[in-house]
Image (tube, rainbow, N blue to C red):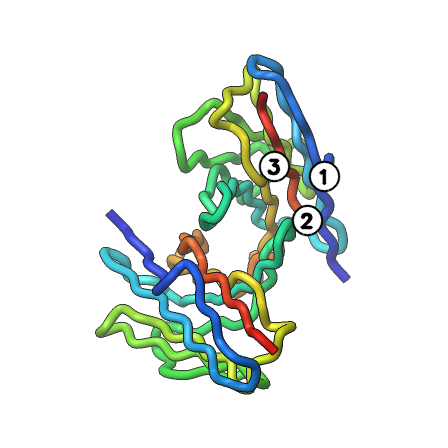
Amino acid sequence: SQKIEQNSEALNIQEGKTATLTCNYTNYSPAYLQWYRQDPGRGPVFLLLIRENEKEKRKERLKVTFDTTLKQSLFHITASQPADSATYLCALVSDAGKSTFGDGTTLTVKP
Amino acid sequence: SQTIHQWPATLVQPVGSPLSLECTVEGTSNPNLYWYRQAAGRGLQLLFYSVGIGQISSEVPQNLSASRPQDRQFILSSKKLLLSDSGFYLCAWLDRGSVDTQYFGPGTRLTVL
């Protein structure tokens, strides 16, 4: 069966450092992969999308990589800030547009 | 611009009671619509999705049902709630012309006692 694993439930880092979150998947061939941010009690908000034929995507302080051989995506936040503290979800999307979400990693950036 | 509404925001219901959660989208037409459930500390579980009026696909056998009576309205229902139905319910829409991004509503926190 399809399985998505995000590296850890919680990640604590110091302000200014780079946060790196991992999303691994098995038994899946996604058309593309998305990263979302979710704050407590709120719906997820889309951050970045990367397609299967792309290696890297950037948006301001965010960077996503996608390795279809390793079946892994890495999500980086550079120069992290306390406001970046949230839960980050990865989602694999099939050709039919159906999304499968990971359980998320909760990031805490300490000042 | 597009907006998505869900109500109620919070709901406490006894076991065995019925449920109706509503989701409406504004500013777009013919969207794909989705219902997800999220347990505490977990990711999103896809419950239902719809590609058009009256077209519902169920992803997980359960105590719930969904309907799409209008293009931009998606309803999640149950005839008799179970304790295990508690959770955070999220509606989302996707522009069928651009399958890149799902936009989520604010969610409904359901507690079944």
Tell me the distance, in whole angstroms, between the alpha carbons under discs 2 and 1.
8 Å
Closer to the camera in the image, B5 or A16: A16
The residue singled out by tag 1 in the image is B9
Q: Residue at x 58, y 21 (%)?
A: B113
The residue singled out by tag 2 in the image is B106
Mark before the other along the chain sequence, 3 or 2: 3
Asked whether disc 2 touches disc 1, contact meaning CB atoms under 8 Å apart, the reply is yes
Can you give x and y, in whole percent of width and height, for residue B33 in the image? 58, 45
The residue singled out by tag 3 in the image is B53
Note whether residue A111 is visible: yes
Mark before the other along the chain sequence, 2 or 1: 1
Mark before the other along the chain sequence, 3 or 1: 1
Tell me the distance, in whole angstroms, between the alpha carbons under discs 3 and 1.
25 Å
Disc 3 versus disc 1: nearer the observer:
1
Q: Amino acid at mark 3?
A: Ile
Report whether A27 appears left or right of A106.
Answer: left
Callout 3 and callout 2 share a chain = yes
Can you give x and y, in whole percent of width and height, for residue B88 in the image? 58, 40
Q: Can you name the residue that lies furthest to the top here?
A: B16
Can you give x and y, in whole percent of width and height, for residue B98 in the image? 56, 64
Can you give x and y, in whole percent of width and height, for residue A48 in the image? 52, 72
